[in-house]
Amino acid sequence: LALGPRVRPGVNASAVLRSVVPGEDLVSAALAGKRGEIETWLQNARGEEIPVRVAFLPAGSGSAVAVLTDLTKMRRLEQELRQRERLSLVGQLSAGVAHEVRNPLAGISSSAQVLLGRFEPRDERTRFVKAILDEVERVDRIVTQLLQFARPGEPRWRRGSLAETVRHLLEISGPWLAESGVEVETVLAPRVPESWFDPDLVHQVLLNLVSNAVQAMPKGGKLRISVRPLTRRGVARSVGRRREDMRARSAGRVPSTRVVQVRISDAGEGIAKENLSRLFDPFFTTKPSGTGLGLSICQSIVQEHGGSIHVASRLEHGTTVLVELPVDRRQGERRNR
Ligand code: ADP
Ligand code: MG
C-alpha cells in the first residue's frame, strides 16, 4: 500500500489509516470494539488513493487488529470486465446495424446499375449515377470493416507457411498494384518455418497494410516485403504460457519465442510524429474517405495470434510496419465477440 514512512511506533494510527471519505475514522471504529469489514479508499504516503478492504477484529483491552487488502488489482479487473462487456455490446449492435444497412445498400446499388445501363455513355447524367455507386461502395466498405473489427469470427487455426500467404496476397493484388504504379520487391528468407495461424485473418492483416502502403504512395513507388524467422527473448505477457517457458525459467534461462517476421516498407508520405500514437485507435484516419479501422483490425488479429505489430515512420520518407507472429501454438487473447 506504500503507507510508507508514516508507519512508525508512536505515530497516531489515524494518521496512517487515513480514509479519503470525509468523516470516516477507521481507527476509532476499530477501537470502539466494532467488528466488521468495510471497503474504502486510503491515501498512502505518496498521496495516491488506494482502494482497500479493511477487516477489524477487536483484540481486547482497547486494542484491535485491522487487516488491509489492496483492491487495486481487483478494481482494475472489474473495470476491464466492464470494458469487455461494453465492447461486446458494440459488436452485437454493429452486426445488427451492418445487416440492416447492407440490404438497402444492395437495392440502391442494383437500381443505380440499371439506371447506368439506360443512359448513353456520353450522357452527363451518368456522372451522378457513378457518384451514387462510389458512395455505396464506400458505405459498404465501412460496414465490412466495422464487422471485421467488432464481430471477428472464430479463428481457424492451421499450420502453414506465412511466406505462402504473402505470395498469394501479392498474386491476387498484382493487377491493382501495377495499376497504382507500385513496384513490389519481395525478400523471402530461406527456410522460414511453418507457423500456427489463421491464413484468412492474416491475409486480412496483410491486405490492410499493403492498402495503406499503396495509399501512402499516390504517385506509385516501391513496396518492400520481407519474411524471415527470428528468435525473440522473452514471452509477451498476454500470450498463453507453455510448459517449456517454466522449464526455461527454472533452469535460469530466459524463455524465448520463435517468430516469423513480416516487414512491409513503403516509400510513401510517412506519418507525422503526433499521429504515431493514435494509429491503432479505432476510427483514427487522416484520409478523406478512410474508415480508420484498418490498423485496429490488424492489431486485434495479431494480438489474438499472440504476436505483435509495430509501426516506424519518417515523414516524407516512408513507413515500415513489422508484424511478428509466433511459430508455435501460442494463442494470444481472444477478441471480444
Ligand atoms: P485508414 O486507412 O482507413 O485511414 P488505418 O487504420 O488503416 O485507417 O490507418 C490509420 C491512419 O494511419 C491512416 O489514415 C494514415 O494516416 C496512417 N497510416 C497507416 N499506414 C500508413 C502508411 N503506410 N503510410 C502513411 N500513413 C499511414
Ligand atoms: Mg487503412
Image: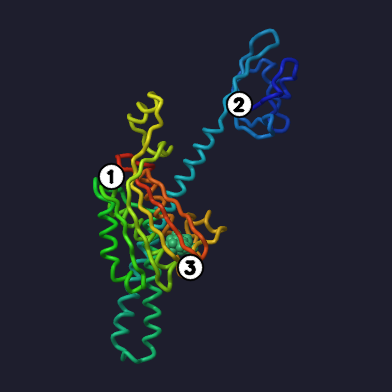
Q: Residue at x 33, y 69 (%)?
A: 177
Q: Residue at x 45, y 45 (%)?
A: 84
What's the residue type where badge 1 is placed? Answer: Trp
Q: Earlier in the sequence, mark 3 or mark 1?
A: 1
User: Looking at mark 3, is its residue's CB closer than 8 Å to ligand 1?
Assistant: yes
Q: Kindly report which numbered mark, 3 or 1, lies closer to the viewer in this rendering.
A: 1
The residue indicated by pointer 2 is 38
Work out which residue is located at the far top of the displayed protein and give it. Answer: 61
Residue 291 seen = no
Quarter where residue 23 is shown = top right
The residue indicated by pointer 3 is 287
The residue indicated by pointer 1 is 196
* In the depicted structure, whether residue 101 falls above or below residue 227: below
Q: Secondary structure at mark 3?
A: loop
Quadrant of image for the N terminus: top right
Q: Secondary structure at mark 1?
A: strand
| 91 left or right of 29 in image | left
Q: Secondary structure at mark 2?
A: strand
Q: Residue at x 33, y 30 (%)?
A: 244
What's the residue type where badge 2 is placed? Answer: Ile
Q: Horizontal and vertical percent for residue 276? A: 52, 56
Q: Residues within 10 Å of mark 1 (few under 14, many from 20)?
A: many
What's the residue type where badge 3 is placed? Answer: Lys
Quarter where residue 212 is shown = bottom left
Q: Earlier in the sequence, mark 2 or mark 1?
A: 2
Q: Horizontal and vertical percent for residue 104? A: 35, 70
- Which of 225 and 216 lies nearest the eye of the viewer? 225
Q: Residues within 10 Å of mark 2 (few under 14, many from 20)?
A: few
* In the depicted structure, whether residue 48 falls above or below residue 228: above
Q: Residues within 10 Å of mark 3 (few under 14, many from 20)?
A: few
